Amino acid sequence: MEELIEKLKKEVIAQLNLEDISPEDINPDSPLFGEGLGLDSIDALELIVLLEKNYGIKIEDPKDGKKIFFSIRSMAEYITENKK
Amino acid sequence: MESLITSCCIIRDNKVMLNDRLIYYQENISKFADFAKSVYKQANISYPKFYKMDSVSKLGFLATELVLQERTIAGYLPEKVGVVFANASSSLDTDMAHQETIKDRSGYFPSPSVFVYTLPNIVIGEVCIRHQIKGENAFLISESADAKMICNYVNELFDNDRVDACICGWVEVLGGQFFSLAMLVEKPEHYIPTDGIIKFLPKIFNVEHVNLFLKPN
């Protein structure tokens, strides 16, 4: 799980062009949106693309997004449970 | 009464000219994004959203940012500041980047963050968000840099009392080539050197002067 979390941090930084942020700056349990990394709605769409492109996971119900993308750890847990 | 160009930034040929001074030069540029990032850092700008912008927005944002580092618009009502930019290729540079993400049906992953920039006027939105500008805006398209078109449009805004100040110019990026001219235009009665030091001698906002800025050195 920890390995996947570190990989995800790098992927999120690259996918969202977070050039001023390094993997060490991201607390895997902090919220990604709002107070955390301050991501916006377009970033949310990019994270959906990231899951599909890199892990083959398609989110069928948009309502699940809030829970899945709460933090890097919640993303990693969802990937572990659903990776094909 | 004619308006004045009170601050002016030209970015082209690997150079950044701000109010007649060369403030940045990079001999070899492999990618526009790298050049833009270097200018951003040199100018001590802190605005992480910059990294997410497309090339046209980065270029227009940087030129505007530098113009407003020399002349503030803080004294104006947000509704009385306009933004008028123009170019020749619209958002074609970004349109092609978007097309790259959708051309292969087996790897069909359109990027939302690229797609949102497939309109030329997004650069104006970025500038307005950054500087809380709420006045008239327009993005004009013409085959080549057209001083008359820009002057006519902006002067109409001043003549009809729609703006007290206007950021305007040319923002063109295509295939690695780039050129931006950003000018702050103000009514003469609003022009007071903020610190008593004249860093840039204002020029009358007319076709002749704008053509001088648009002309390659």
Image: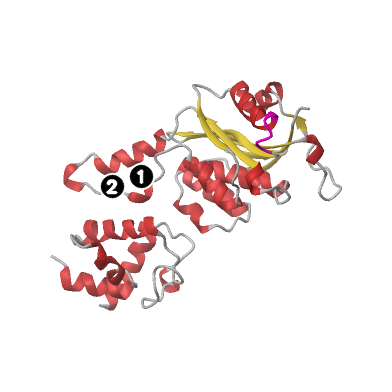
**CB atoms at circles 1 and 2 under 8 Å apart?**
yes
Is A58 rendered above or below residue B121? below
Q: Residue furthest right?
A: B196
Q: In the rendered image, which residue does mark 1 sit on?
A: B115
Q: Which amino acid, mark 1?
A: Phe
Viewer can see residue B9? no
Q: Nearer the viewer, residue B79 or B178?
A: B79
Q: In the rendered image, which residue does mark 2 sit on?
A: B110
Highlighted range, magenta: B159-163
Q: Is residue A68 magenta?
A: no
Q: What chain does mark 2 sit on?
A: B
The quadrant of the image that shows the N terminus of chain A is bottom left
Is B198 rendered above or below residue B217? below
Q: Which amino acid, mark 2?
A: Pro
Is disc 2 surrounded by few (<14), some (14 to 19) or many (20+) residues within 10 Å? some
Of the two numbered discs 1 and 2 on the same chain, state the one appearing first in sequence: 2
